Structure formats: C-alpha cells, structure tokens
Amino acid sequence: MDPEEVDVVQPIDRQRGITLEDFKLIKMQMSNYITRLAQHVKVRQRVVATAITYMRRVYASKSLTEYDPRLVTPACLYLSAKSEESTVQARLLVFYIKKMYPDDMRYRFEIKDILEMEMKVLEALNYYLVVFHPYRSLTQGIVNDTYKTDLILIHPPHLIALACIHIASVLKEKDSIAWFEELRVDMNVVKNISMEILDFYDGMRTNIDERISIAFSKLPLRA
C-alpha cells in the first residue's frame, strides 16, 4: 500500500476532532495492547505480528468511530491465532481483558462481542488473511518495534528487515556497505525506511502517554 492510503483519517473520525497524529497514536497503543494481551494467553510472536497487521489493515479503510479499536484489537488477535494455527479461546481473551482493565467499562466485552467483531474484521480484510513478515530469526528489538507503525502495510518485509539491520549496524559502528552492495538493493529506500523507524523512536520521547490519552478521549463512548 502507498503511505497515502494508510495515513487516512476517515471523515467521521475527523468530525470528532481526530487528527492524523491521534490516528497514529491510537494504532500504536492498540499494537501495545495486542502484545500485552498475547503475553497473557501465551501465543507466539508471529501471532502477535499478524494480529497487529490485521488491525492496521482494518483501519486503512474503516473508521475508529465505527470500529471500536478496543474491540477490534482482541478480535484481530483471536483471528490471527486461528490463521497461524495457534488457536486461543475467546473466553480467555475476555477473562484477561477484564483482568487488565478491571475498572474500565470501555473494555468490558463478552464472548459474543469478539465473535461478532471477528466477522466484521474478516469483511474489512476482504477475507484475505495472508501476511508476510520481515523476520524469521530477527524476532526482537527493532523489528518488533516496526509493528507499532504502518511500515508493514507500506514496504515489502525484506526491505523492513534490511532497514533494521542497517540501523543496528550503524548503532554498533559496523561497516556493512560491502554487504549491502552484494545484495544489490536500493539503499535509498532502505535508508528512507530506517529514517521512518528513527522518527518513530524520536516521537516516543515527547509526552507520549498524555498524547495517547488525548487521542482516545476523542473516541465515542460505548453504549
């Protein structure tokens, strides 16, 4: 997908005052939510990565107002576990969500809510569940952080992986020029992706919790 297709705030969300920055912050927070919930139900990292990709694909075409991210998130994890052959029971998701947010009614869901949203997510994805990831052995650190952005929707997985290697080599002061030349990849693209990742890290330094809280305050309350 092109960046212009991913970074689109739907009209109904704009009417609620949701900005592009709010949109990105909410998706980042929901990526963290998926990761935390997945730790409770004990699924593989690949399931987490697929769930986050599903969530981000959904919001490439659907609104936050009509598709409550607090419900879309566990539904994506539930669907991802199935597609990655690591099934998780919906009742476990409900149990741990309530445990994670015991006093927040905005996260009070039942099994039927997750099952119903799973169908809406499937429709939003046009029933296309295949996801290619930028790693096999690179399972931590920078690669995992890229799932807090929309890079997986915009760039091929192998280029994201190379950008992560490029960042790591710079940080470790390793000379990787010859290695990249042998691969015959467009280093301008790799460097641009690297800059997007570094920009993400830079943005994380400035009042991130407060900005996330303000962004979520613009979402509608559940009936």
Image (cartoon, rainbow, N blue to C red):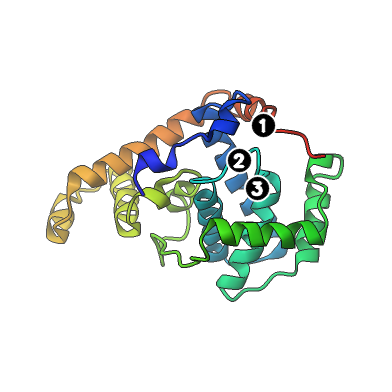
Residue at (56% x, 64% y) in the render: 47
Evaluate whether residue 38 shows in this view: no
Check the image and report above or below for 138 versus 192. below
Check the image and report above or below for 114 versus 62. below
Residue at (46% x, 60% y) in the render: 139
Mark 2–mark 3 CB contact (< 8 Å) = yes
Name the residue type under label 1. Phe
Q: Under tag 1, what secondary structure?
A: helix
In the depicted view, which residue is nearer to us: 75 or 96? Answer: 75
Q: Residue furthest right?
A: 103
Residue at (82% x, 39% y) in the render: 223
Name the residue type under label 3. Tyr
Q: Earlier in the sequence, mark 3 or mark 1?
A: 3
Q: Residue furthest bottom?
A: 85
Residue 102: image x %, image y %?
Answer: 86, 45
Query: Which residue, given by chain and number where applicable, does mark 2 sit on?
Result: 29
Q: Which mark is residue 103?
A: none
Residue 44: image x %, image y %?
Answer: 58, 67
Check the image and report above or below for 65 versus 206. below
In the depicted view, which residue is nearer to us: 8 or 168? Answer: 8
Q: Which mark is residue 33?
A: 3
- Compute the Cα span from label 3 to label 1: 13 Å
Q: Earlier in the sequence, mark 2 or mark 1?
A: 2
Number of marks in the rendered image: 3
Place residue 39 in its image quadrant.
bottom right
Left or right side of 137 for 158: left
Q: Which mark is residue 216?
A: 1
Q: Under tag 3, what secondary structure?
A: helix
Name the residue type under label 2. Gln
Residue 110: image x %, image y %?
Answer: 83, 56
